[in-house]
Image (cartoon, rainbow, N blue to C red):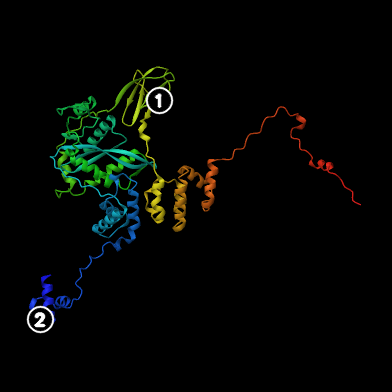
Amino acid sequence: MAQQHYIKYLRDVKDQSISQIAEQLGVSWRTAKKYADCSDWNKAEPPLRGKFPIMEAYRVQVDTWLMEDQARPKKQRHTAKRIYDRLVTEFGFAGSDRTVRYYVAKRKSELQIEKSEPYIRLEHPGGEAQADFGTFQAIIGGQLVERKMLILSYPYSNAAFVFVTPKENTECFLEGLRQLFEMSGGVPNRIWFDNLSAAVVSVGTDGNRKLTDEFQRFALHYRFQPVFCNPAQGNEKGHVENKVGYARRNWCVPLPVANDLEQLQKIMNQQALEDLRRPHYAKEVLQQDLWEQEKIKLLELPIIPYEAFRLESVKANGYGEVLIDQKTVKIPSIRSHERVWVKYWWDKVDVLNDSYEVLITLPRGYMDESVPVDLQTLLQPLYSKPKALDYSSVLAFLLSQTKGFLQSVEGKSRKTRIGWIIRMLKTYQIEEIERCLTQEDQDDVSRLEHVLYRLRHPEIIPAPMKDSRTPSVFVGYQPDLTRYDQLQRTEVRK
């Protein structure tokens, strides 16, 4: 600023020419001219940022993802990096990562979406692992479900493997560890855990832990040393904490879609293997190479795998029913008050007789649990931006006729239909709307509401009454009403 002031002084006070000023100060003629003849020294406003012309073609997609995130769990929402990766992979986006970050930050601020918290990196020697559960949502068989991911992470190589399970009970926990060891091709020497109830019965004041018998047998079978964090100090296993968050943000956004739990597990396995191909975040070496080095330090798998189950003796009631997972279930071929064995696996239940012969096998009650989907909330942002429907994950929750009803039109017509669906969902179930759209012409939206009412409240035609008192000669008799004309007075006019 001092040089600019001096240039102005030489021009106005010393009356020097532009060329003289430029030569004396060693600046260009253009610079000398700019400040010598400047008449407006007000502070310039910062340049506007946020036009994002390259994002113009992708605004609808990105805004749709961000709006849908508001109905998702906080830890399973899009980050700017995930949005950039999806734009490149799914739409061939040619812009920079920085442009996407600027745009997403601006839109998140406008939508009042919270920013993700930073994570802490920790280092550990090879051959050790950390285990932890995380919760995520997925779409299985068209239903929104909440599932658990048990992650076994290896801090040295940053490798991680995932087991998808419905619950965090002992059977799911031990079966998950068994399968994770098999995915790893070996057993870690030491594994860090939380004080989860599936392994720890209690923590004494001196820090000593009483472990469950089942977990102790499992640890002896696979020969690893369990290490437990101090209470409320999950950061002591910070690597797996970070990995759970990373998996949710990168492997579960958008929501994974599968036909069943087995297919969902395959999807997560593929994600974990592909993740090994990226460079380590700090060592500048491929994680795959580091993992090959670390695998050598793992213990060999036992020849006989551990079978994780819980066996209970249960007495049937007077109706031949037994209590399984807090629900009364009718078991064929057993007598009233007979005792049977109930064998709980992580995904199924075997009912056995006294000779341990399987009488019936049932799925665990939680295998089909789903999360209610608030379609009104998911559809509401699309009412103002109907074009975004084609890129929205809400399509996965719509039945075929309803999906076609919305996608078969565009512009104002689509907006009208989305608004109609939102309004009808206040009174009717989506299955009722689907049935209505299956039976009726979809073009006349004004008529559909009456059809919905008729489907829910069908016309009731009472059955004919049985009359045993009326003489048979009069049954079905139809009177001749013209005979009543004789009763009319006849006037003769002259």
Relative to residue 357, is residue 244 drawn left or right?
A: left
Relative to residue 259, is residue 288 drawn left or right?
A: left
- Residue highlighted by disc 2: 14
Mark 2: which secondary structure? loop
Crowd around label 1: few <14 · some 14–19 · many ≥20 (10 Å): few
Mark 1: which secondary structure? strand
Q: Tell me residue 278's x, y (percent).
A: 20, 49
Q: Tell me residue 222's x, y (percent).
A: 19, 30
Relative vertical location of residue 142 with respect to residue 10 in this rendering, above or below: above
The numbered mark, 2 or 1, whose residue comes first in the sequence reads 2
- Front: mark 2 or 1: 2
Q: Tell me residue 351's x, y (percent).
A: 36, 24
Relative vertical location of residue 333 with respect to residue 422 in this rendering, above or below: above
Relative vertical location of residue 352 with respect to residue 299 in this rendering, above or below: above
- Residue highlighted by disc 1: 328
Q: For the point 34% across and 42% down, which residue is it?
A: 138
Task: Please name the amino acid that badge 2 sits on.
Answer: Lys
Query: Residue placed farthest to the right in the image?
Result: 494
Q: Nearer the viewer, residue 320 or 10?
A: 10
Quadrant, the N terminus: bottom left
Relative to residue 40, is residue 146 drawn left or right?
A: right
Q: For the point 32% across and 25% down, which residue is it?
A: 343
Q: For the point 55% across and 43% down, which residue is it?
A: 454
Residue 435 appears anywhere in the view: yes
Task: Give the total number of marks visible in the rendering.
Answer: 2
